[in-house]
Image: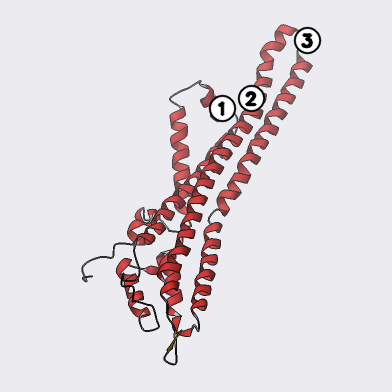
Amino acid sequence: MTQNQSPPLSFQRSDIEKKLFMPAGEFTQPGPVLPAALAILSGVVFYLLLQLVPGAWLERSFTQRGWVPYAIVFFSAWAFWIIVVKYFKINVQARALGRPLCPDDPSFYISADTAVKVLDRLYDICDEPRDFLLYNRIQFALSNLKNLGRVGDVDEVLRSRADSDESGAESGYTVVKGLLWAIPVLGFIGTVLGLSVAIGSFGAVLATSADAEEIKPALQSVTAGLATAFETTLQALVVTLVIHMFMTMVRRKEERMFNRFNDYCERQVVAKIRIKHDGVQA
């Protein structure tokens, strides 16, 4: 590779958060700023679009049912954008699989002497191997190759790093899981508030009105409270279901990527390692 030619893979050029000049989370973990900013923006856009259909059921449901629908919209958008950002970051990490690490020569093997060539190859592939899960794992193992006594030791190091990477990736869903717990709770809060308004209004109607004709208009406040009670629960349950299904799809995609990472390490690293002990190849 010439000095003026950039490596084909670059976390700085590919990561969605870096492209938008936002603080980027490590590997597949979204940073704190971009999803929250997109949630606020999409919430504003959603309520602006509702103004195009004044009086429609959807507009009334999200604008005339107290503060709970606003909170549901924001939390739902926040969880959605966290998953979207994570999806794009997974795609960036998966690009590492398309680059072979070792030469096609079947006689080539990795030893303490040739490991330097493999490590140099990492920098030909990407500008900073530590920004890519797969290459960071391989770099760590090969950098310690001289200190390892057996090929099995290398495999154990790679598997240990794999477990650590998967645990770190799973922590990227912590905020989403918290939001998916909070959204239905908000729906139930809306239900309790709506029922309390309805019951209070109904009691006031019975106390002040004796004529049936006078009761009918007053019952509108009762029905409004009931609408709040049931619609906020409906909103919360629907968005929770949709976001949970979306998260499941992205998690499955990430799991498949990690499985392919493990297979790549087996084929490109472990299967090609030969460790010498006092001139004897193991």
Task: Read off the residue under disc 1.
Answer: 61
Residue 116, by quadrant, is bottom left
Q: What element carries label 1?
A: helix
Residue lying at 74% horizontally and 20% vertically, measured from the top left: 202
Please, which residue is most extreme toward the bottom here? 278
Q: What element carries label 2?
A: helix
CB-based contact (under 8 Å), mark 2 and mark 3: no
For label 3, the crowd category at 10 Å Cα-Cα, with few meaning under 14, some 14 to 19 and many 20 or more, is few
> From what the image shows, is residue 104 above or below residue 59?
below
Which numbered mark, 2 or 3, is in the foreground of this view?
Answer: 2
> From what the image shows, is residue 181 above or below residue 161?
above
Q: Distance between the Cα atoms at labels 2 and 3?
A: 25 Å
Q: In this view, does 193 lie to the left or right of 114?
A: right
Task: Read off the residue under disc 3.
Answer: 210
CB-based contact (under 8 Å), mark 1 and mark 2: yes
Task: Look at the image and tell me whether residue 110 can be seen.
Answer: yes
In this rendered view, identify the residue nearer to me: 151 or 160.
151
Q: Distance between the Cα atoms at labels 1 and 2?
A: 8 Å
Q: Distance between the Cα atoms at labels 1 and 3?
A: 31 Å
Give me the disc on residue 227.
2
Percent position (x, y) of residue 224? 64, 22
User: Looking at numbered disc 2 in the image, what kind of residue is underneath it?
Assistant: Ala
Which callout, 1 or 3, points at the residue further toward the start of the chain?
A: 1
